[in-house]
Image (cartoon, rainbow, N blue to C red):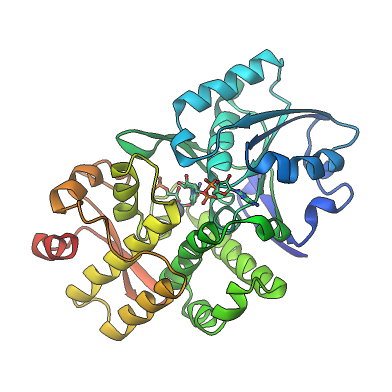
Amino acid sequence: MTTLKVELGERSYPIFIQANLLQQPNFLAPFLKTKTVVVVTNEIVEPLYFPLLAEALKGCQISKIVINDGEEFKNLQTFELVISELLAMSAARDTTLIALGGGVVGDLTGFVAACFQRGMPFIQIPTTLLSQVDSSVGGKTAVNHPLGKNMIGAFYQPQAVLIDTNTLATLPEREFAAGMAEVIKYGVIYDAEFFEWLETKQEQIKAKDTDVLQYMIGRCCAIKAEIVAVDERESGLRALLNLGHTFGHAIEAEQGYGNWLHGEAVATGIVLASSVATKMDWLQTSEFRRIFELITSFNLPTSAPAEMNYDCFMRHMRHDKKVQAGKLNFVIPTSIGAAKVTSQISEEVLRTVLS
Ligand SMILES: NC(=O)c1ccc[n+]([C@@H]2O[C@H](COP(=O)([O-])OP(=O)(O)OC[C@H]3O[C@@H](n4cnc5c(N)ncnc54)[C@H](O)[C@@H]3O)[C@@H](O)[C@H]2O)c1
Ligand SMILES: O=C(O)C(=O)C[C@@H](O)[C@H](O)[C@H](O)COP(=O)(O)O
Ligand SMILES: [Zn+2]
């Protein structure tokens, strides 16, 4: 078992990572305020993992809310639907919400928890690689708006993050690869040694070696916990976690949140940001190549949809949350293991990279 902690004073919480965690007796009990629990999940995950969770919650009064599957359902309509179901079942402020699923279920459930009666406790049980390494940790909760990704949300931390790596056994390969984009991100922005480790462990990662996955997920959660503890609300350091997202979110919004997966858009965004960095002479070409090669080795896309030109990107990117005083800020790698946030990118370079 890997145990980590997100240090946020009285809002601190643990992260547990273990194969078969869902089958450990009483693994949830310490984090429940009362014995009334509502599990939010989706139509794909529910038949796979709700029965195990229900077994672990024996003795509690359990209800479940099953939402539609897909990023296009991470919106205000689903938010309202979940709130209405909570009201219909007379959920109260001390009911615990449990998010069982990927980042869509986690982000939406967290936002519901932040808003329902102005805040109720929630627990993250992430079941995709992406949600285990990134979205379940750190308290960014949100839904999308047609005009912009994660435009409506709150910073709201869970009571605990409980990761059963065995759930990855049923995850489609394309979804696993999408999660690898966020994994690679941590190496690029923060940890050169981890990036090198990823380069050498590609085969074991693809083979889903249990120990290798446990270490990889643990390292990502540890980096994220460290960053969030320093800068919970993204006034500085935390913005680095947004590497690739300014371009990536533009791709997702342009596609109407279908077609491209979040991780795929982020992978392409990382390549675009790295390309900007080399053109501005901030990143060596040899390092650009290593980033590009690691991303392509997991079959992730590296170029934006052909129909998206500079103007199209700019139209979406003006809604980016890192806009300050009307200026767009980009996260740009400066070497493997380090990145900076800057608005000082020439229009010419941006036009070249986005054309
Ligand atoms: N809050 C944050 O800090 C943060 C960080 C990164 C990403 N995100 C958000 O996370 C979302 C992406 O998350 P995601 O990649 O997990 O997508 P997702 O939640 O859509 O899950 C991907 C697919 O896998 C299915 N699935 C989930 N677990 C499964 C399992 N164990 N076996 C089989 N199928 C399974 C889902 O039903 C879905 O079809 C995006 O909305 C993104 O914006 C948030
Ligand atoms: O936790 C963070 O901070 C991140 O930026 C992690 C990202 O991987 C994630 O996709 C996040 O939801 C993006 O946040 P946003 O503020 O750009 O909507
Ligand atoms: Zn992301």
The residue sitting at the left extreme is 348
Whether 349 is drawn above or below 146: the answer is below
Q: In this orientation, which residue lies closer to the viewer: 170 or 30? A: 170
Estimate the x, y position of residue 9 in percent, counting from the top left: 63, 48
Q: In this orientation, which residue lies closer to the viewer: 3 or 235? A: 3
- Quarter of the view holding residue 11: top right
Estimate the x, y position of residue 97 in percent, counting from the top left: 68, 33
Estimate the x, y position of residue 246 in percent, counting from the top left: 31, 53
Q: In this orientation, which residue lies closer to the viewer: 355 or 318? A: 355
Residue 109 appearing in the image: yes
Estimate the x, y position of residue 231 in percent, counting from the top left: 47, 53
Looking at the image, which residue is at 48% across and 75% down? 191
Residue 16 appearing in the image: no
Looking at the image, which residue is at 16% across and 53% down? 309
Whether 188 is drawn above or below 148: the answer is below
From the image, which quarter does the C terminus lie in? Answer: bottom left
Looking at the image, which residue is at 65% across and 20% down? 86
From the image, which quarter does the N terminus lie in? Answer: bottom right
- Quarter of the view holding residue 112: top right
Left or right for 210, reference 333: right
